[in-house]
Amino acid sequence: MAKTKHQKEQMIKELSESIEKQKAMVLVDFGGVKSDILFALRNKLREAGCLLKVVKKTLFQKSLEKRWEKGLMAKLGEIKNQLAIAFSFDDETTAGRICRQFSKENVNLKILGGVVGNEFLEKEKMIELADLPSREELLSRLAYVLISPLTRFAFVLKSRSEKSEKS
């Protein structure tokens, strides 16, 4: 059923609000993807504090008029299939990481590119960003690197003291 003008204006308003709040957007082509996989993607994104919106390209373009991105507008013109946008509000990599994971499992789900902050990223750059470890994982790696020398030093001291006690 066709949407009324008021419904379309409301959708543009909601999209504009999401665009203003986002830290990153991932453009996804989901043509040929089964609905249960799309719902699983939506649920996984929702659990991570992200949002997946299936939109018409024309409505998305109208919602971008305030923040016109040359690369993004050109990319939208190239898209032939159905478009979904994954919004990440907490950090720049969460939505991309989840979409990347699903695209590995489902060949019909394709990452087309994205926006981080105000900068449009091509498909390759977006996939590269999605493959980065999470903030928590990076912090745990840093903690390990910082604690490792101290742990080794304590182990050496302990083994020396045990050797001296035996003698």
Image: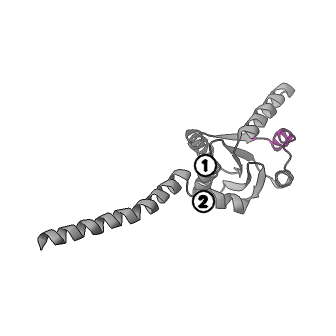
Relative placement, left or right, of 159 versus 148 is left
The location of residue 91, given as percent across then percent down, is 63, 46
Quarter of the figure with the C terminus: bottom left
For disc 1, the marked residue is: 94
Residue 42 vs residue 22: left or right?
left
Residue 35 position in % (x across, y down): 63, 43
The reply to whether dot 2 and dot 1 touch (C-beta < 8 Å) is: no
Mark 1 neighbour class, 10 Å CA radius: few under 14, some 14 to 19, many 20 or more: many
Direction left: furthest residue:
167
Q: Quadrant of residue 164?
A: bottom left
**Mark pair 2, 1: CA separation:** 10 Å
Furthest toward the bottom, the residue is 167
Q: What residue is disc 2 on?
A: 131
Q: Which residues are magenta?
A: 55-67
Q: Secondary structure at mark 1?
A: helix
> How many discs mark residues in the rendered view?
2
Residues 16 and 23: in front is 23
Q: Quadrant of residue 126?
A: bottom right
Residue 2 shows in this picture = no
Image point (65%, 61%), residue name: 128
Q: Earlier in the sequence, mark 2 or mark 1?
A: 1
- Image mark for residue 78: none
The amino acid on which the numbered mark 1 sits, given as a three-letter code, is Thr
Q: Name the residue located 51 percent from the left edge and 51 percent from the top edge.
A: 136
Task: Indicate whether 63 appears above or below 70.
Answer: above
Q: Three-letter amino acid code at disc 2?
A: Asp
- In this view, the residue farthest toward the top is 6
Query: Does 62 lie within the magenta span?
Result: yes
* Residue 5 falls within the magenta-colored stretch: no
